[in-house]
Amino acid sequence: LTSLLYETTNNLARQITLYRNSLQKHGYDPKQGKVALMLHTFIGDDEESIRNQVKEPFCNYIKTHFGLVEKLAKKIDFPVDPDTFTESDRACLFDFAFERYLQGRVMIVTKETCRQTIEHLKKIGVDEIACLIDFGLDFTSVMNSLAKLKDLKEEYFDEIFKRVSKPYLYKFTVDDLKEIGIDNEHDLNFFKR
């Protein structure tokens, strides 16, 4: 499990290669190990409205994690001394951080751009994406984005099953689901499909 907060996808690709090579070197199947990448995620309809909708809540979110912003700035040799910062300096730094995160460190995009991001991450060896959806947006916006994310997930599953001649899909029983803590009616219905 990793993130791109301080890394680029090029650095991540190198790390994944090292990980897989190390597995192989020590007698393990390099494809057995799974790489999951955490990405802040919001899927909207167009880039401009997404940016307008997400910027303030995301900047407020990263204000609560100022240490992450400091590390990101230092990582790219951007001099940071928080003790001398004015409010204007902080606002500029958060704007800077927001723009840097949008450059491939988050999945705050349209569905089409999301597909491109997913394809790129698959190519560099990422197996799973853990979507972080709670960074200050209102409930309705999060749920609308989640619906788009669900549609995208289903498109990928459809594509995968078309490639497999005889797909095997485990059918969960209600008891299986309850055993792992899924016991409310809404969640149970989702898995019954």
Image: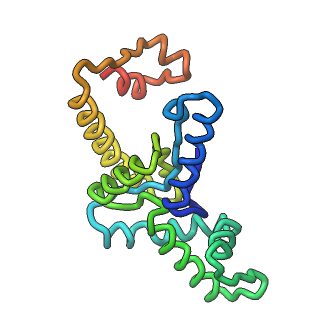
Give me the residue at 61% from left, 88% from top. 88
* Image location of residue 44, percent across then percent down: 32, 59
Q: Is residue 142 left or right of residue 180?
A: left
Q: Is residue 99 left or right of residue 85?
A: left
Q: Quadrant of the C terminus?
A: top left
* Image location of residue 142, percent across then percent down: 41, 52
Q: Is residue 141 left or right of residue 19?
A: left
Q: How is the image coloured?
A: rainbow
Give me the residue at 68% from left, 73% from top. 70
Q: Residue furthest front?
A: 25
Q: As displayed, is residue 94 above or below residue 21?
A: below
Q: Nearer the viewer, residue 163 or 117?
A: 163
Q: As displayed, is residue 92 above or below residue 32?
A: below
Q: As displayed, is residue 185 above or below residue 130?
A: above
Count of picture labels: 0
* Image location of residue 87, percent across then percent down: 65, 86
Q: As displayed, is residue 186 above or below residue 42?
A: above
* Image location of residue 106, percent across then percent down: 47, 60
Q: Quadrant of the N terminus?
A: top right
Q: Residue furthest right?
A: 83
